[in-house]
């Protein structure tokens, strides 16, 4: 079974659609169908059956799926071992990141990384935290950059993955110029209207947690929107206050579109973490990117945090270290 056929098979199995799978593996729909047919002919069994909700795995397909995942993992490790033994420094790395992190942290950092590693091609996918972790599980991305969440306990304890906290981004309270005032306690602040992202988003989790940990009811929401950029614009228009990571609105604050207010209490910073799959041997290109991100992806300067009133009540937990052989240890 050629790895290419197994990769296409898994793409169809996960998306339950030839059309969506074709987008993932960058092939025409007809090529995806041909590869599935080739694999079924080789194995002598149908792997999919059609249902109202999409393609479903047959009993034979269900049996193949975990084995296909193991075979592709071994194929990747074999290639990585050969590249490492040959002293290769080239390759391709696919990064996944939240939109805010991609634009505010990775976009300014990647040109410097490319200048120091011209033989490494970097691709980047932007998605929400949940989608990024699914893509990491499925092998669609090599490393995910997103804010760490306590309720991602499943992934935090999953031995398939390693995680490193590389920065602690402060949350800031923002308002339209002249619209906000410095409140002395969280209970009073909670009487104001806020603009926040939708439930399930990592930024909404930060917002809810900031008040819940202080025993204060969540404030009334003037709007729920799907992006931090939209929140900044709504706050600037006077729709309500916002509580979001500083890196997402530093430019808007610098322009004077919105103003930063003192936070009347203590709240965790948002740990910015990178997560990747453990391997016996890391691909050289990925290993170099992980090392560079650890060493040079600079967090917010201390001067930028001064005066915000936001302090870290819970420092980041110990994180995993990358060892010379590419494995991970605490």
Image: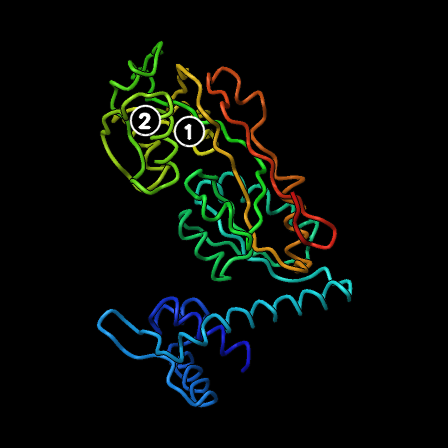
**Would you say the residues marked 2 and 1 are in contact, meaning their CB atoms lie under 8 Å apart?**
yes
Residue receiving disc 1: 252
Please state the total of marks drawn on the protein image. 2
* Residue 84, percent from left and from top: 74, 62
User: Residue 292 occupies which quadrant of the picture?
Assistant: top right
Between 213 and 201, the one nearer to me in the picture? 213
Residue neighbourhood size for the residue with mark 2, other residues' Cα within 10 Å, grouped as few (<14), some (14–19), many (≥20): many
Q: Residue at x 48, y 43 (%)?
A: 146
Quarter of the picture containing the C terminus is top right
Furthest toward the top, the residue is: 184
Q: Secondary structure at mark 2?
A: helix
Q: Residue at x 45, y 45 (%)?
A: 98
Measure the C-alpha gap from mark 2 to mark 1: 9 Å
Residue receiving disc 2: 236
The image shows residue 152, relative to residue 259, as above or below, that is below
Between 286 and 211, the one nearer to me in the picture? 211
Q: Secondary structure at mark 1?
A: helix
Say left or right for 228 vs 170.
left
* Residue 40, percent from left and from top: 42, 86
Give residue 64's mark. Answer: none
User: Residue 77 occupies which quadrant of the picture?
Assistant: bottom right
Q: Residue at x 33, y 33 (%)?
A: 231
Between 211 and 227, the one nearer to me in the picture? 211
* Residue 157, percent from left and from top: 51, 47
Say left or right for 118 vs 164.
right
């Amino acid at each position: 079974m050629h790895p290419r056929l197994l990769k296409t098979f898994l793409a169809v199995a996960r998306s339950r659609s030839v059309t969506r799978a074709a987008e993932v593996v960058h092939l025409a729909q007809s090529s995806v169908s041909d590869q599935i047919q080739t694999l079924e002919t080789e194995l002598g069994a149908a792997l999919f059956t059609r249902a109202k909700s999409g393609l479903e795995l047959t009993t034979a397909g269900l049996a193949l799926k975990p084995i296909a995942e193991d075979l592709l993992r071994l194929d990747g490790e074999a290639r990585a071992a050969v590249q490492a033994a040959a002293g290769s420094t080239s390759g391709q790395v696919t990064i996944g990141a939240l939109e805010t992190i991609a634009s505010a942290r990775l976009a300014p950092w990647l040109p410097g990384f490319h200048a120091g590693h011209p033989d490494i091609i970097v691709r980047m996918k932007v998605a929400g935290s949940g989608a990024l972790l699914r893509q990491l599980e499925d092998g669609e991305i090599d490393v995910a950059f997103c804010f760490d969440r306590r309720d991602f306990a499943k992934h935090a304890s999953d031995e398939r993955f390693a995680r490193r906290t590389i920065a602690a981004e402060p949350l800031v309270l923002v308002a339209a110029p002249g619209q906000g005032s410095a409140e002395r306690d969280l209970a009073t602040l909670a009487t104001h209207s806020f603009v926040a992202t939708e439930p399930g988003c990592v930024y909404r989790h930060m917002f809810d947690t900031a008040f819940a940990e202080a025993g204060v009811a969540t404030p009334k929401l003037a709007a729920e929107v799907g992006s931090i950029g939209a929140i900044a614009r709504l706050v600037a228009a006077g729709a309500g206050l916002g509580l979001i990571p500083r890196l997402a609105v530093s430019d808007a604050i610098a322009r004077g579109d919105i103003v930063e207010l003192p936070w009347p209490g203590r709240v965790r910073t948002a740990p910015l973490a990178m997560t990747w799959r453990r391997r016996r041997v890391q691909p050289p290109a990925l290993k170099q990117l992980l090392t560079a991100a650890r060493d040079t992806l600079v967090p917010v300067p201390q001067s930028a945090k001064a005066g915000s009133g936001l302090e870290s009540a819970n420092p980041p937990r110990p994180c995993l270290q990358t060892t010379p052989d590419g494995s991970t240890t605490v």
